[in-house]
Image (spheres, rainbow, N blue to C red):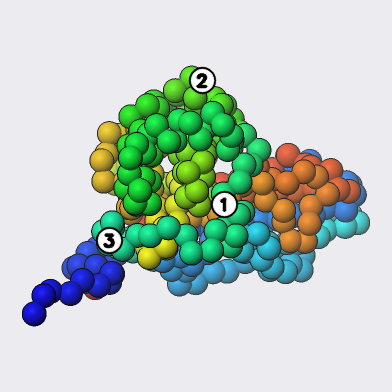
Amino acid sequence: MPATFTCAPEASNATRVITRYEIDDRFSLTRATGVGVVDVWCPLIPDTPYQRVLSVAVHAPTVWTVSHEREHGNSVLHARLSGALSRDPSFRLRYSVERRPVGHMLDPRCARALDTPALFQRWLRAERFVDVDEGTRALAREVIGPSTNVLEQARRIYEHVAGAMAYDAQQQSWKGSTQHALACSVGNCNDIHALFISLCRSVGIPARLVMGQAFEPPPPGQENCEVCGYHCWAEFFASGLGWVPVDASCACKYGKDHLFGDLEMNHIAWSTGRDIQLEPAQGGDRLLFFVGPYVEVDGTPYSAIERRIVFTEIRSLSD
């Protein structure tokens, strides 16, 4: 009797390491005393197939609500302060997050074309600074060559981007730009993944940005570490596989070759997508990215925010 093949998840996760993080995210509004109506939005760390929020606590100077923005489903904490404000009103969010291996079985036999592309239009069209046009379509067709399998096409795009781009945060576009990546072949994680997303979308593969942090280990003898900046990666969708993560940025920066369908264990996601319309809606433009607090005063963006994130890797264990 011939052997049968099923597209089932890998079973090897049972012997892999699980990492748990305690995360303390604090931010305050500076020079805010006496200003008008203040609206504060902040992303809440979500559950994903590779991370699980075990606990979360919010400390805020006023009442707050949690909602989900409509296009990407990101969890949004919102608070409104009005009248006389205390000096530098502050917020604190404390999480315990368990990070698990991604665990995708990337077999081309499992991948197939989209059954209903109309369901994925949000992740197939152009966005601000992420192009889908004749130029990106021509390059994407050249990169994928004769391949007709969506997983193999995505892998060729990933390998092209990782090989063509150099990581240099000092030479980034500051907005995650396909044109910057194509013209300069250098940038930060946002530029690198803008190019990956553009090329995927240009051949009909849904792709999206994930914003978060990469928690670097603390110096020897120290138990926690302060985080500056952010990190991002991308996901593409293949029917039969679902959303598959890739990190072409770390591949460029560190020369790692295993980050197609995988992520380093120190990656924690905060939000998905670009051009974010918050809930409730902000008065200003859509947010290019949503990885930290966003504040408006009387409907106008307010940037005097101080943020500090401290994390502790409390233990690693196996299932």
**Could one spot residue 285 in this view of the protein?**
yes
Tell me residue 126's x, y (percent).
62, 42
Choose mark 2 or mark 3, whichever is in front: 3
Picture quadrant where residue 119 is located: bottom right
In the rendered structure, the answer to whether residue 200 lies left or right of residue 281 reads left
Residue at 36% from the left image edge and 45% from the top image edge: 153
Tell me residue 296's x, y (percent).
80, 47
Q: What is the three-letter code of the residue carrying label 3?
A: Arg
Q: Which residue is mark 2?
A: 183
Q: What is the three-letter code of the residue carrying label 2?
A: Ala
Disc 1 is placed on an element classified as: helix
Q: Camera-side residue: 304 or 70?
A: 70
Disc 2 is placed on an element classified as: helix
Residue at 8% from the left image edge and 80% from the top image edge: 1
Q: Which residue is mark 1?
A: 123
- Mark pair 2, 3: CA separation: 36 Å
Residue at 56% from the left image edge and 49% from the top image edge: 124
Q: Look at the picture and state if 31 lies above or below 80.
A: above
Residue at 88% from the left image edge and 48% from the top image edge: 298
Choose mark 3 or mark 1, whichever is in front: 3
Q: Earlier along the polypeptide chain: callout 2 or callout 3? A: 3
Disc 3 is placed on an element classified as: helix
Q: Earlier along the polypeptide chain: callout 3 or callout 1? A: 3
Q: Report crowding for label 2: few under 14, some 14 to 19, many 20 or more residues within 10 A (C-alpha).
A: few
Q: Earlier along the polypeptide chain: callout 2 or callout 1? A: 1
Q: What is the three-letter code of the residue carrying label 1?
A: Trp
Q: Outermost residue, bottom direction?
A: 1
- Mark pair 3, 1: CA separation: 23 Å
Residue 109, numbered label = 3
Q: Report crowding for label 3: few under 14, some 14 to 19, many 20 or more residues within 10 A (C-alpha).
A: few
